[in-house]
Amino acid sequence: MSQPPQQGGPGEPEGFGAPFEPQPGVYGAPVAPSLKPGPYGQSPQPQPGPYGQPSQPPYGYPQPPTVPYGHPGSPPSSPPDGPGGGRSRGRLAALVAAVLAGVLVIGTGVWFAVGGDDADDGKPVAKESGASKKPGPQVTPAAGADELNKGRKDGEAKVRWVEKNGVDLPQGGARVRGPWFTGDIVAKAVYRTASGHSAEDGTRKWSLRLPADVCAAPTLPSPDGKVVVGLRSDTSDGAPCDRLQMIDLTTGKAGWTATVERTGMQDGLSHIVMAINGDVVTVGRTTLTDAYRISDGEHLWGTLPGTCQPYGLTSGDIALAAVDCRKRPSDDDVGDEEVRRIDPATGRTVWTYKVKKGWKVDRFYSVDPPVVSLRQGELNEKWAIALLNPDGTYRAQPVPGKEDFEVQCGEPGENLDDCLGAAADSGTLYLATKPAAGADGELTNSVVAFDLSTGKAKWKVPAPPAQTLHPLRVENGQVLLYLTPPPVKAGNGGGIMALGPQGGALRPVLRHPASAATAVTGLFDPTIRFAGGRSLISSGYITAETDEEEMDLRTMIAFGD
């Protein structure tokens, strides 16, 4: 990334815009959690399945943002090219319009969940206009894996299973929510269907039809394997994202439903930010956040006292909130913003870090320790990273030098903990540099380690030629990274790599077979999961040039011995 203009005051390090000032005051009782970093730096929730807790949420190479990141209500951008490449072409011209419109074609106002897949069971099911889509020959997950394992070499992990789309989607395709893991189930939601698959062999365990488009979902499920998704209120164009549906991921059974009540005209519900912390799910947007108990759907809290309101939280054991303190209800300027650690069950503030005026919270790269991405400007052209102590006090900021960095996040207006390319432990922040053409003309990048106490770079390790590295998380003192396959045949398929605290040579953890490289690069806007010696790559968006190709697309590929 290019270095933005300097904004800092005396004693502040240069680089990344330097918008931070040490914060001597802490609101509430500071808490210094002694938690081992997990996904996004947070403590992992117990998930006994072979993939464990997802290591990273959906990501892609974002184009320069045109709307504020992290602020619900911002229109989504077109799906970006992910590290695997594979952008479809024919339908992308209609993609943004389709997403904005919710690609909803009937206005029944139905509000209930129905079981089953795409079969007509006599119940109201939203179907798109035009010719119906006919799936091609059914291929089992094992058979799909056998196809990709042909030519697998010694030392390469095998493809365990492959899942194909098979979901009837509207013109322009649809975004995938998840995947989520609980026990032996890997689940996801796309368009108006949620489904659960065996994490062991990929066979479908359940499918749940939903009455309207899934428009939002948390990055992580609850510790007991439940998720709450956001749905459009009905199937009409522009319907608000104001319905909640709880789903038991173990059984696929639909639980309670709720409607998020508007508090006024400025309470935008076109896009919402969702997070799960224990037995609490939160629904954030520009003006406020609502919290519900997952076990029974009870509303726990909404508008908090004062003018400062959270508009998005992080999932996991630690709830960090992005907070807007603009004057209400008519101030349209960028208000003062804060980062708070809160008690998700009550909304009570544990500590507060005040962001420098004119800057807004963009994303959370880690929650333990807190690493916060900040943006400034109408086009978010200025970028900064704040490194905080566990009690929310200012610690340092990275000094980028001449390096240009790029952390890959989801669309504007979506979850605040959905980034790839940054990971942290108690002493080090790992960042991916922006891919640039190497000697062979193909894109490649590096990973740089920063000292959290000083912000200074400690070391830099390049990716192999024509490949890129993306930090996932820190585990047992080493940073785990996803290595993309090269865009042309080069004898390897990428995989999971590791670097020790001193850098050095990349160590292979799980080599993906070169025979599957083309299939991996064909996954659009992919999501990477790795735990227990196995990895899963899942499409973040499903679209294709024709209906037949769309139905036959590979959407999840699992690797491991």
Image: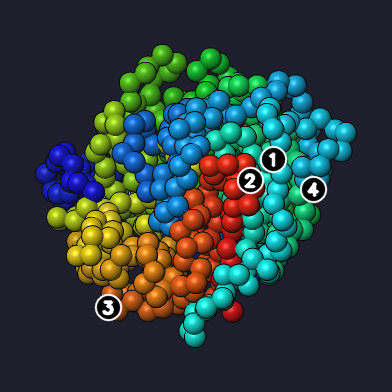
The residue that mark 2 highlights is 548
Judge the density around disc 4: few (<14), some (14-19), many (≥20) Cα neighbours within 10 Å.
some
The number of discs equals: 4
- Circle 3 — which element? strand
The residue that mark 4 highlights is 253
Report, in whole angstroms, how far the alpha carbon at label 2 lies from the one at label 1.
7 Å
The amino acid sitting under disc 3 is Gly
Which sits earlier in the primary sequence, circle 2 or circle 1? 1
Q: Who is closer to the viewer here, 492 or 531?
A: 492
> Where residue 297 sits: x, y (%)?
72, 38
Report, in whole angstroms, how far the alpha carbon at label 3 lies from the one at label 2.
47 Å
Judge the density around disc 3: few (<14), some (14-19), many (≥20) Cα neighbours within 10 Å.
few
The amino acid sitting under disc 2 is Glu
Outermost residue on the left side: it is 10
Q: In this view, does 410 lie to the left or right of 108?
A: left
Report, in whole angstroms, how far the alpha carbon at label 3 lies from the one at label 4.
48 Å
The amino acid sitting under disc 1 is Lys
